[in-house]
Image: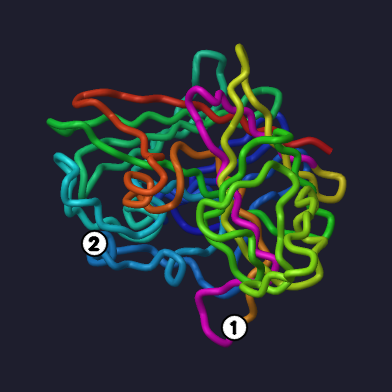
Amino acid sequence: MAPDSVTLAAGGSTVAIVPALGGKIASLHLGGREWLWRSDVIPWSVPDERLAADDHASYVELADTGGYDECFPTVGACRVPDGVPGAGGVALPDHGELWAQHAPTTTGRDDAGAPTATTRWQGRRMAYAFSRTVAVERDGAVRMTYAVESRASERLPFLWSSHPLLPLTPDTRLELPVAARVRVWAQHGLDLGGERAEHRWPVLRVRENAGEPDARFGPREHDFTWPARRGAPYACKLFLDLPRPATGTVRLAVEQGDGRLEVEVDPREVTHLGLWLNHGGWTPFAGKPAYRNLAFEPCIGAPDPLDAALDRWQGAAWLAPGETRTWTLRWRGHR
Protein backbone atom coordinates (compact mmCIF):
# COMPACT_ATOMS: atom_id res chain seq x y z
CA MET A 1 0.00 0.00 0.00
CA ALA A 2 1.20 3.50 -0.80
CA PRO A 3 2.44 5.78 1.97
CA ASP A 4 -0.06 8.05 3.66
CA SER A 5 -2.94 5.61 3.18
CA VAL A 6 -6.07 5.62 5.35
CA THR A 7 -7.67 2.20 5.90
CA LEU A 8 -11.22 1.48 7.08
CA ALA A 9 -12.38 -2.02 7.99
CA ALA A 10 -15.57 -3.58 9.33
CA GLY A 11 -17.81 -6.54 8.59
CA GLY A 12 -15.16 -8.28 6.49
CA SER A 13 -14.75 -5.29 4.16
CA THR A 14 -11.69 -3.06 3.78
CA VAL A 15 -11.27 0.27 2.00
CA ALA A 16 -7.88 1.99 1.56
CA ILE A 17 -7.68 5.68 0.57
CA VAL A 18 -4.52 7.56 -0.50
CA PRO A 19 -4.94 11.33 0.10
CA ALA A 20 -1.70 12.17 -1.72
CA LEU A 21 -3.02 10.54 -4.91
CA GLY A 22 -6.05 12.80 -5.17
CA GLY A 23 -8.02 10.82 -2.61
CA LYS A 24 -7.79 7.67 -4.72
CA ILE A 25 -9.40 4.57 -3.26
CA ALA A 26 -6.56 2.13 -3.82
CA SER A 27 -8.32 -0.96 -2.47
CA LEU A 28 -11.97 -2.02 -2.29
CA HIS A 29 -11.99 -5.45 -0.68
CA LEU A 30 -15.58 -6.68 -0.40
CA GLY A 31 -17.17 -10.11 -0.25
CA GLY A 32 -13.85 -11.86 0.24
CA ARG A 33 -12.00 -10.38 -2.76
CA GLU A 34 -10.31 -7.31 -4.17
CA TRP A 35 -12.38 -5.69 -6.90
CA LEU A 36 -10.18 -2.89 -8.22
CA TRP A 37 -7.87 -3.23 -11.20
CA ARG A 38 -4.24 -2.10 -10.88
CA SER A 39 -2.13 -0.93 -13.81
CA ASP A 40 1.18 -2.65 -14.47
CA VAL A 41 2.16 0.13 -16.90
CA ILE A 42 1.80 3.39 -14.94
CA PRO A 43 3.40 3.59 -11.46
CA TRP A 44 1.89 5.57 -8.62
CA SER A 45 3.28 9.10 -8.61
CA VAL A 46 2.29 11.83 -6.20
CA PRO A 47 1.11 14.92 -8.16
CA ASP A 48 2.70 18.28 -7.41
CA GLU A 49 1.47 21.87 -7.70
CA ARG A 50 2.75 22.17 -11.25
CA LEU A 51 0.65 19.21 -12.35
CA ALA A 52 -2.42 20.41 -10.48
CA ALA A 53 -2.19 23.76 -12.28
CA ASP A 54 -1.65 22.26 -15.75
CA ASP A 55 -4.82 22.57 -17.86
CA HIS A 56 -3.39 20.02 -20.31
CA ALA A 57 -2.36 17.36 -17.77
CA SER A 58 -3.19 13.88 -19.07
CA TYR A 59 -4.79 11.59 -16.52
CA VAL A 60 -4.65 8.61 -18.87
CA GLU A 61 -0.88 8.97 -19.32
CA LEU A 62 0.09 9.97 -15.78
CA ALA A 63 -2.49 8.81 -13.23
CA ASP A 64 -4.59 6.02 -14.77
CA THR A 65 -3.02 3.59 -12.33
CA GLY A 66 -6.22 1.79 -11.41
CA GLY A 67 -8.27 2.00 -8.25
CA TYR A 68 -11.21 4.36 -7.76
CA ASP A 69 -10.89 8.08 -8.51
CA GLU A 70 -13.42 10.93 -8.53
CA CYS A 71 -13.98 13.02 -11.67
CA PHE A 72 -15.31 16.57 -11.27
CA PRO A 73 -16.39 19.01 -12.77
CA THR A 74 -15.74 17.14 -16.04
CA VAL A 75 -14.44 13.76 -17.14
CA GLY A 76 -13.12 14.62 -20.58
CA ALA A 77 -10.72 17.50 -21.10
CA CYS A 78 -12.55 20.50 -22.53
CA ARG A 79 -13.05 24.23 -22.56
CA VAL A 80 -16.36 25.50 -21.18
CA PRO A 81 -18.23 27.37 -23.94
CA ASP A 82 -17.73 31.13 -23.82
CA GLY A 83 -21.41 31.89 -23.31
CA VAL A 84 -21.73 30.04 -20.00
CA PRO A 85 -22.02 32.67 -17.22
CA GLY A 86 -19.33 32.42 -14.57
CA ALA A 87 -17.45 29.55 -16.25
CA GLY A 88 -17.23 30.50 -19.93
CA GLY A 89 -13.81 29.89 -21.47
CA VAL A 90 -12.48 27.90 -18.49
CA ALA A 91 -10.15 25.05 -19.53
CA LEU A 92 -10.70 21.81 -17.60
CA PRO A 93 -8.14 18.99 -17.64
CA ASP A 94 -8.57 15.32 -18.48
CA HIS A 95 -10.68 13.50 -15.86
CA GLY A 96 -11.32 16.75 -13.99
CA GLU A 97 -9.21 18.48 -11.37
CA LEU A 98 -9.56 16.32 -8.25
CA TRP A 99 -7.07 13.56 -9.11
CA ALA A 100 -4.12 15.98 -9.23
CA GLN A 101 -4.69 17.46 -5.76
CA HIS A 102 -3.48 16.35 -2.37
CA ALA A 103 -6.85 15.67 -0.77
CA PRO A 104 -6.91 16.04 3.04
CA THR A 105 -8.68 13.13 4.70
CA THR A 106 -9.96 12.93 8.28
CA THR A 107 -11.19 9.84 10.08
CA GLY A 108 -13.92 9.32 12.65
CA ARG A 109 -17.06 7.31 13.35
CA ASP A 110 -20.67 7.89 12.41
CA ASP A 111 -23.66 7.73 14.76
CA ALA A 112 -23.83 3.94 14.38
CA GLY A 113 -20.14 3.54 15.21
CA ALA A 114 -19.00 2.78 11.66
CA PRO A 115 -15.45 3.94 10.83
CA THR A 116 -15.46 6.85 8.40
CA ALA A 117 -13.03 8.85 6.27
CA THR A 118 -13.94 12.24 4.83
CA THR A 119 -11.88 13.51 1.91
CA ARG A 120 -12.12 17.14 0.74
CA TRP A 121 -11.16 18.97 -2.42
CA GLN A 122 -11.30 22.64 -3.43
CA GLY A 123 -12.14 23.93 -6.89
CA ARG A 124 -9.19 25.53 -8.68
CA ARG A 125 -10.72 26.61 -11.97
CA MET A 126 -14.33 26.87 -10.81
CA ALA A 127 -15.70 27.96 -7.43
CA TYR A 128 -16.82 24.91 -5.44
CA ALA A 129 -15.97 22.62 -2.53
CA PHE A 130 -16.27 18.85 -2.98
CA SER A 131 -16.26 16.11 -0.34
CA ARG A 132 -16.71 12.35 -0.04
CA THR A 133 -17.31 10.48 3.20
CA VAL A 134 -16.68 6.73 3.11
CA ALA A 135 -18.19 4.61 5.89
CA VAL A 136 -17.74 0.85 6.29
CA GLU A 137 -20.83 -0.46 8.03
CA ARG A 138 -21.12 -3.31 10.48
CA ASP A 139 -22.48 -5.69 7.80
CA GLY A 140 -19.62 -4.85 5.40
CA ALA A 141 -21.53 -2.44 3.18
CA VAL A 142 -19.50 0.58 2.05
CA ARG A 143 -21.48 3.82 2.03
CA MET A 144 -20.09 6.77 0.10
CA THR A 145 -21.79 10.10 0.74
CA TYR A 146 -20.90 13.00 -1.53
CA ALA A 147 -21.47 16.74 -1.26
CA VAL A 148 -20.62 19.58 -3.61
CA GLU A 149 -21.14 23.19 -2.59
CA SER A 150 -21.19 26.04 -5.09
CA ARG A 151 -19.16 29.07 -4.11
CA ALA A 152 -19.95 30.87 -7.34
CA SER A 153 -22.08 33.99 -7.76
CA GLU A 154 -23.80 32.50 -10.83
CA ARG A 155 -25.14 29.08 -11.79
CA LEU A 156 -22.36 26.50 -12.03
CA PRO A 157 -22.43 23.64 -14.59
CA PHE A 158 -20.79 20.32 -13.77
CA LEU A 159 -20.45 16.62 -14.42
CA TRP A 160 -19.49 14.10 -11.74
CA SER A 161 -18.41 10.53 -12.24
CA SER A 162 -17.09 7.90 -9.92
CA HIS A 163 -14.23 6.11 -11.64
CA PRO A 164 -13.69 2.62 -10.23
CA LEU A 165 -11.68 0.40 -12.56
CA LEU A 166 -12.22 -3.37 -12.40
CA PRO A 167 -10.51 -6.13 -14.40
CA LEU A 168 -12.48 -7.28 -17.44
CA THR A 169 -12.40 -11.08 -17.33
CA PRO A 170 -13.96 -13.72 -19.61
CA ASP A 171 -16.60 -14.46 -16.97
CA THR A 172 -17.52 -10.82 -16.26
CA ARG A 173 -21.31 -10.47 -16.24
CA LEU A 174 -23.17 -7.14 -15.99
CA GLU A 175 -26.59 -6.91 -14.37
CA LEU A 176 -28.14 -3.59 -15.38
CA PRO A 177 -31.72 -2.36 -15.92
CA VAL A 178 -33.18 -4.18 -18.91
CA ALA A 179 -34.26 -1.89 -21.75
CA ALA A 180 -32.53 1.17 -20.23
CA ARG A 181 -31.53 3.64 -22.92
CA VAL A 182 -27.85 3.38 -23.87
CA ARG A 183 -26.03 6.11 -25.76
CA VAL A 184 -22.60 5.83 -27.32
CA TRP A 185 -19.84 8.29 -26.52
CA ALA A 186 -16.72 6.53 -27.87
CA GLN A 187 -15.95 3.37 -29.85
CA HIS A 188 -12.72 1.61 -30.83
CA GLY A 189 -12.51 -1.51 -32.97
CA LEU A 190 -16.27 -1.81 -33.47
CA ASP A 191 -19.05 0.30 -34.90
CA LEU A 192 -21.97 0.98 -32.58
CA GLY A 193 -23.34 3.79 -34.70
CA GLY A 194 -21.10 6.60 -33.48
CA GLU A 195 -21.62 9.35 -30.92
CA ARG A 196 -25.17 9.57 -29.52
CA ALA A 197 -26.34 6.39 -31.27
CA GLU A 198 -29.07 4.86 -29.09
CA HIS A 199 -29.55 1.25 -28.01
CA ARG A 200 -31.48 -0.60 -25.29
CA TRP A 201 -29.55 -2.59 -22.72
CA PRO A 202 -28.26 -5.28 -23.05
CA VAL A 203 -28.65 -5.62 -26.83
CA LEU A 204 -26.38 -3.36 -28.90
CA ARG A 205 -26.39 -3.22 -32.69
CA VAL A 206 -22.86 -3.87 -33.92
CA ARG A 207 -21.49 -3.70 -37.45
CA GLU A 208 -18.80 -6.35 -37.69
CA ASN A 209 -16.46 -4.24 -39.86
CA ALA A 210 -16.21 -0.80 -38.30
CA GLY A 211 -17.08 1.83 -40.88
CA GLU A 212 -18.02 -0.79 -43.51
CA PRO A 213 -21.65 -1.78 -43.01
CA ASP A 214 -22.73 -4.96 -44.75
CA ALA A 215 -25.42 -3.91 -47.24
CA ARG A 216 -26.87 -7.42 -47.30
CA PHE A 217 -27.43 -7.90 -43.61
CA GLY A 218 -27.01 -4.49 -41.95
CA PRO A 219 -26.40 -4.22 -38.20
CA ARG A 220 -26.10 -7.32 -36.04
CA GLU A 221 -27.38 -7.45 -32.50
CA HIS A 222 -25.15 -8.59 -29.64
CA ASP A 223 -25.89 -9.18 -25.97
CA PHE A 224 -23.33 -7.20 -23.91
CA THR A 225 -24.31 -8.82 -20.61
CA TRP A 226 -20.99 -10.71 -20.96
CA PRO A 227 -18.80 -7.97 -22.51
CA ALA A 228 -15.63 -10.08 -22.81
CA ARG A 229 -17.24 -12.86 -24.85
CA ARG A 230 -16.63 -11.04 -28.13
CA GLY A 231 -13.57 -12.49 -29.81
CA ALA A 232 -12.13 -9.39 -31.46
CA PRO A 233 -10.51 -6.61 -29.40
CA TYR A 234 -12.64 -3.52 -28.87
CA ALA A 235 -13.31 -0.69 -26.45
CA CYS A 236 -16.28 1.63 -25.99
CA LYS A 237 -17.72 4.22 -23.60
CA LEU A 238 -21.46 4.00 -23.06
CA PHE A 239 -23.94 5.91 -20.91
CA LEU A 240 -27.07 4.29 -19.50
CA ASP A 241 -30.00 6.41 -18.36
CA LEU A 242 -30.97 5.02 -14.96
CA PRO A 243 -34.72 4.37 -14.70
CA ARG A 244 -36.58 6.25 -11.98
CA PRO A 245 -38.91 3.98 -10.01
CA ALA A 246 -41.79 5.63 -8.20
CA THR A 247 -39.99 4.96 -4.92
CA GLY A 248 -36.71 3.46 -3.85
CA THR A 249 -33.35 2.86 -5.43
CA VAL A 250 -31.77 1.00 -8.34
CA ARG A 251 -29.21 -1.75 -7.89
CA LEU A 252 -26.45 -2.34 -10.45
CA ALA A 253 -24.12 -5.33 -10.33
CA VAL A 254 -20.96 -6.93 -11.73
CA GLU A 255 -20.29 -10.65 -11.32
CA GLN A 256 -16.89 -12.30 -11.76
CA GLY A 257 -16.20 -15.91 -10.82
CA ASP A 258 -17.95 -16.56 -7.51
CA GLY A 259 -18.02 -12.84 -6.61
CA ARG A 260 -20.71 -10.22 -7.00
CA LEU A 261 -20.27 -6.47 -6.56
CA GLU A 262 -23.41 -4.35 -6.21
CA VAL A 263 -23.94 -0.62 -6.02
CA GLU A 264 -27.23 0.89 -4.94
CA VAL A 265 -28.15 4.42 -6.07
CA ASP A 266 -31.13 6.75 -6.05
CA PRO A 267 -31.69 7.75 -9.71
CA ARG A 268 -33.18 11.06 -8.58
CA GLU A 269 -29.67 11.88 -7.34
CA VAL A 270 -27.40 9.80 -9.60
CA THR A 271 -28.81 9.95 -13.11
CA HIS A 272 -26.54 7.75 -15.25
CA LEU A 273 -24.15 4.83 -15.33
CA GLY A 274 -20.99 5.34 -17.37
CA LEU A 275 -19.63 2.08 -18.74
CA TRP A 276 -16.11 1.85 -20.19
CA LEU A 277 -15.51 -1.58 -21.69
CA ASN A 278 -11.91 -2.18 -22.77
CA HIS A 279 -11.54 -5.68 -24.19
CA GLY A 280 -7.97 -5.22 -25.36
CA GLY A 281 -9.07 -2.44 -27.69
CA TRP A 282 -7.39 0.73 -26.37
CA THR A 283 -4.30 2.11 -24.66
CA PRO A 284 -2.89 5.64 -24.61
CA PHE A 285 0.62 4.30 -25.28
CA ALA A 286 1.59 3.44 -28.85
CA GLY A 287 3.13 0.02 -29.16
CA LYS A 288 2.05 -1.12 -25.68
CA PRO A 289 -0.46 -3.93 -24.99
CA ALA A 290 -4.01 -2.67 -24.70
CA TYR A 291 -5.75 -2.86 -21.34
CA ARG A 292 -8.48 -5.27 -20.32
CA ASN A 293 -10.52 -3.40 -17.79
CA LEU A 294 -13.98 -2.14 -16.98
CA ALA A 295 -15.00 1.23 -15.55
CA PHE A 296 -18.32 0.84 -13.71
CA GLU A 297 -19.28 4.44 -13.04
CA PRO A 298 -22.41 5.77 -11.35
CA CYS A 299 -22.42 9.38 -12.47
CA ILE A 300 -24.36 12.63 -12.76
CA GLY A 301 -24.67 13.91 -16.31
CA ALA A 302 -23.35 12.74 -19.67
CA PRO A 303 -21.19 12.39 -21.73
CA ASP A 304 -17.57 12.74 -20.57
CA PRO A 305 -16.65 16.34 -21.53
CA LEU A 306 -18.59 19.17 -19.94
CA ASP A 307 -18.66 21.16 -23.18
CA ALA A 308 -20.41 18.29 -25.02
CA ALA A 309 -22.83 17.88 -22.10
CA LEU A 310 -23.71 21.56 -22.31
CA ASP A 311 -24.02 21.58 -26.08
CA ARG A 312 -24.78 18.42 -28.07
CA TRP A 313 -26.12 16.20 -25.29
CA GLN A 314 -27.89 18.74 -23.09
CA GLY A 315 -26.73 16.52 -20.22
CA ALA A 316 -24.95 18.80 -17.74
CA ALA A 317 -26.03 19.28 -14.14
CA TRP A 318 -26.23 22.72 -12.49
CA LEU A 319 -25.72 24.22 -9.06
CA ALA A 320 -27.42 27.45 -8.04
CA PRO A 321 -25.23 30.05 -6.26
CA GLY A 322 -24.57 28.78 -2.73
CA GLU A 323 -26.37 25.47 -3.36
CA THR A 324 -25.11 22.21 -1.86
CA ARG A 325 -26.05 18.96 -3.59
CA THR A 326 -25.62 15.56 -1.95
CA TRP A 327 -25.89 11.97 -3.13
CA THR A 328 -25.01 8.50 -1.88
CA LEU A 329 -23.64 5.23 -3.26
CA ARG A 330 -23.83 2.00 -1.27
CA TRP A 331 -21.47 -0.78 -2.39
CA ARG A 332 -21.79 -4.43 -1.29
CA GLY A 333 -19.77 -7.52 -2.09
CA HIS A 334 -21.11 -11.09 -2.07
CA ARG A 335 -19.87 -14.55 -2.85
Position of residue 310 measured from the top left corner of the image (x, y, whole percent): 32, 44
Kindly identify the amino acid type of the residue bearing the numbered disc 2.
Glu
Q: Is residue 279 above or below residue 253?
A: below
Kindly identify the amino acid type of the residue bearing the numbered disc 1.
Lys
Q: In front: 61, or 283?
A: 283
- SS of the residue at dot 2? helix
Q: In front: 306, or 147?
A: 306
Q: Which residues are drawn in magenta? A: 260-288
> Crowding near pointer 2: few (<14 within 10 Å), some, many (20+)?
few
Quarter of the image with the N terminus is bottom right
Q: Upstream in the sequence, badge 2 or badge 1?
A: 2
Distance, label 2 to label 1, CA atoms, is 29 Å
Q: In front: 60, or 181?
A: 181
Q: Quadrant of residue 37?
A: bottom right
- SS of the residue at dot 1? loop
Position of residue 116 measured from the top left corner of the image (x, y, whole percent): 50, 29
* Observer able to see residue 136: no
Residue 226 part of the magenta-drawn span: no
Q: Residue at x 76, y 52 (%)?
A: 224
Q: Is residue 100 left or right of residue 15?
A: left
Q: Residue at x 58, y 22 (%)?
A: 244
Q: Residue at x 37, y 39 (%)?
A: 316
Q: Report the residue marked by disc 1.
A: 288
> Crowding near pointer 1: few (<14 within 10 Å), some, many (20+)?
few
